[in-house]
Image (spheres, rainbow, N blue to C red):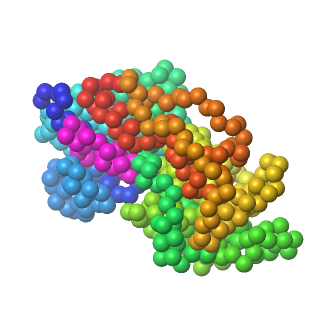
Amino acid sequence: MEYGYGQIRILHVLGVLGLGGAECRIMDLYRNMDRDKIQFDFLVHCSPEKTGKNSPTSDELMAVREPDYFDNTVKQLGGRIFCLPKFVGTNSKDYKAAAKRFFEEHQGEWKAVQGHMTSTAAMYLPIAKKSGIPIVIAHARSAGVDNGLKGFATRLLRAPLQKEGITDYNFACSKEAGISVFGERLMNAGSVRIIPNAIDIKHFAYNEETRNRLRKELGVSNALVIGHVGSFRYAKNHEFLLNVFAQLCRLLDNDDLNQYSMLHGMRIRLLMLGKGQLMDEMKALADKLHIYDRCIFAGNKSNAWEYYQAMDYFCFPSRYEGLPGSVIEAQAAGLQCLVSDTVTSEVNVTELVSMRSINSEPRDWARKIIDDLLLHEDYQEDPLEEEIKLNQTFTAIAGERKESVFESEDAPDMDMLDNGTGFVRINTPDDRPKDMHRSIEYSIGDRSQSSRYIQNKLRAAGFDVKQQARQMAYFYERGHF
């Protein structure tokens, strides 16, 4: 196959096509790609049990595979879906045989194979390379592993990726993810390229109409809504989240000293998006903590961006992450975020993010959330100004908005593409006031006023998927940055 400026096909390797973080980020990139030039296909995994074979073909697996969340999206965008037998640790020989047969049957179809499933990448990427794939890429999207035997096995399987020559390129969503998968030696040698988990920034921008409509649908129009987005699994640390929320409820319910009088009488809810194997266990914990009636287990939502609008605060106490797109999305929606310090610091893009140890007591997290909402900080130089901002915050929570007393200016347009190659941050002189709370572009408590300022900061940090799609198209076409 001749590669130039015609349509080039790229094969992305994943576990499934469900509504997970990696899948969402790839689909965002896919939607924004110039598909006249670049087209994506997907290689996923499923159990071979229903085929009655240990090493079935892709066609045999696809015949018994249940359709996944993004199947229709892939087909509508012009992509194809293929399948390998799921690797379970004891079927290494059968897995490699199936991968070898697959890539031999599809020789010449893809310019690159990009493996987001790094647990088995050291098996399928060398096979793809031997079959004639010009470029093989391992893409690290997680900065940790689960505890116990599963985590030990994952580290063992990833170990070959820390050697030169296994891949042509190593990508990582953050420095921590790169070190976790590829090791410090390759990171220090410059053999790992950091590619942020980009989002459609404008899609998540604060929208008053959407907020009011969805809060009405959820029955939380006059409630204070703490939000979280993440699958119910070990890494996301939902048990800590629920304990933080329980402590927050207790602080407000038993505020005998009237420290939080502004919040008295206000309903409070914990809104959680996501599904997963630990969901039932977390529901039981919520019941045990006597907060179940204050929790909303919303499940997976295709319109997740609308749910960020309905939230008033975002809490994210993960044990480990690569680079959580949900924290970037929350910032794009203008939400203050409290994030565990075990999460990569690269999510700390705007003034909206605070980081705290999950070794702290849940009560400390709860106090931090309340203090953020009440604007209890060390900058109370102008009580009248802070009182105005505080009133704006709780007017917004109640479902009404007043015109801001602050005038706004358009921020510089940072939506530009570097004329060179690679992922270069856009650097512009920053002559804004150093005290972000005095900035005319940014005001805590006014998500609408701050929206453009926040979006520009995220875009400048490389989190705009439209910009990233152009940069990745350059790489896919030319084979280099």
State left or right for residue 185 relative to residue 110: right
**71, 349: nearer the viewer:** 349
Relative image position of residue 449 (x, y in whole percent): 58, 53
Question: In which quadrant of the rendered view does residue 254 lie?
Answer: bottom right
Question: In which quadrant of the rendered view does residue 481 lie?
Answer: top left
**106, 269: nearer the viewer:** 269
Residue at 38% of width from left, 25% of height from top? 419
Question: In which quadrant of the rendered view does residue 402 lie?
Answer: bottom right
Residue at 21% of width from left, 48% of height from top? 79
Relative image position of residue 240 (x, y in whole percent): 64, 60
State left or right for residue 412 relative to residue 303: right
Residue 31: in sight, yes or no? yes
Would you place residue 305 above or below residue 184 in this image? Answer: below
Q: Is residue 297 magenta?
A: no
State left or right for residue 443 relative to residue 473: right
Would you place residue 14 above or below residue 467 in this image? Answer: below
Farthest residue, direction top: 189
Question: Which range is magenta?
Answer: 22-43
Q: Quadrant of the N terminus?
A: top left
